[in-house]
Amino acid sequence: MYQERKINDDLYWVGANDRRLSVFEGVFAIPRGVSYNSYLLFDEKTVLMDTVDRAVQGVFFENIEHLLKEKDCTLDYIIVHHIEPDHCAALPELILRFPEVKIIGNALTIKIIKQFFDFDVESRALIVKEGDTMSFGKHSFTFYMAPMVHWPEVMISYDSASQILFSADAFGSFGAINGNLFADEVDFEHEWLPDARRYYANIVGKYGVQVQAVHKKLVNLKISMICPLHGPIWRENIPWYIEKYHLWSTYTPEETAVMIAFASVYGDTANTADILAGKLAEKGIKNIAMYDVSVTDSSQIVAEAFRCSHLVFASTTYNMGIFIKMEETLLDLQKHNLQNRDIALIENGSWAPTSGSLMKKLFDELKDIRYIAPTLTLHSALKESQLAELEALATTIAESIKQSRAKSFNHE
Ligand code: FEO
């Protein structure tokens, strides 16, 4: 049964949700599910914006076929903003059902469609490039290339009649749409922002420069609505969300806050991390985030590292290296190009502690990393004799946070 939603008189959401998939793209835990958004425009021509993942294509086809029947239309065009299979896996089936449909994409889109599929793409392809405009009646779309946000062929489009931006993966979020299609219908800041941040940091966090390039193209557009390929649609408070993207893509900490991530085999490194957190709290630091990397999806730590200004990593030494779960997490952070953070390290090792120097080596490859204190070295467990050292580390971190807050307050 169809479940499409009306956005305005001409535009419908025809996507679908998946709440059964536990790992998106084979890597990111999605306990709140995910939506695959697709949009259908009715004008002199009928235009579909993207398709959905194969897993949910049944309801997607029910949606579009129901609407086309109701309005006595056929499908004229599909715009492929992004050829990644979570948005184009239903394309071959679409071509079977609507053989006359024309495919609008850029040259790279068309090339990659041919790599994925065997149907006749060439005879249906309409190639657009940066700044091209196509009219479908009263709605006229302008296309802007958005390479590497998230794949190289990504493009976004702007409908000047309705001032709607179809933003592809940009401004998307993990999380299924639970009836409320619009971001202003949910408590986005508290219920959705952590997943939107996690989506940004892990999907496009590496490509801040490219996100900034797209940001510049949008500056002069009057945007009434943002329709992304995942998560809620934006029609209110749009500058607030764009500002989040600006912070994330410039690797500016979203908050002056501390995250402590630890790896502990028998609990001694964890104990030290807990004592440090307690000392920070006693020094007035609030909202301390703490994660055991052994039981935390690394996408969560990547997201929190994009949020927080101060990061503490505490790891035991294992096989003469960084404990494997911490090493995986730090490599993930490194691959996502994290920059501009204040860092403190704690290492543990019963006979040859090396995790501190190895963690530092990983961070040394990132830009604008500041080590705010010498690495604290534990030998098996924290002893009374090292409490003063831990106290000094807590004081340094707390002072650094307070100075950062004072600096940002003075710049407001
Ligand atoms: Fe939602 Fe890059 O695909």
Image (cartoon, rainbow, N blue to C red):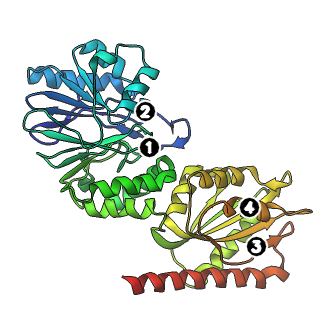
Q: CA distance from mark 2 to mark 3?
A: 42 Å
x, y percentage for residue 348? 81, 65
Chain-order first, disc 4 or disc 2:
2
Quadrant of residue 62 in the image? top left
> Can the viewer see residue 201 in this picture?
no
- SS of the residue at dot 2? loop
Which amino acid type is shown beneath numbered disc 4?
Lys
Residue at 76% x, 54% y is 323
Of label 1 and label 4, which has the lower sequence position? 1
The quadrant of the image that shows the N terminus is: top left
Whether residue 325 sits left or right of residue 39 in the image: it is: right
Disc 2 marks a residue whose amino acid type is: Glu
Q: Quadrant of residue 388?
A: bottom right
> Who is closer to the viewer here, 390 or 78?
78
- Give x and y (percent) for residue 142: 21, 42
Do the CB atoms of the residues marked 4 and 2 lie less than 8 Å apart? no
Beta carbon at label 3 within 8 Å of ligand 1: no
Callout 2 crowding tier (Cα within 10 Å): few <14, some 14–19, many ≥20 = many
- Give me the disc on residue 150: 1
Q: Which mark is residue 84?
A: 2
Judging by the rendered image, the residue that carries numbered circle 4 is 361
Task: Tell me if 235 is positioned left or right of 55 in this view.
Answer: left
Identity, as a three-letter code, of the amino acid under mark 3: Thr
According to the image, label 3 marks what residue? 375
Asked if the residue at tag 2 contacts the one at tag 1, i.e. Cβ–Cβ closer than 8 Å, the answer is: yes
Mark 3 crowd level (few <14, some 14–19, many ≥20, 10 Å Cα): some
Q: Is mark 1 within 8 Å of ligand 1?
A: yes
Mark 4 or 3: the one toward you: 4
The amino acid at mark 1 is: His
Q: Is residue 139 above or below residue 342?
A: above
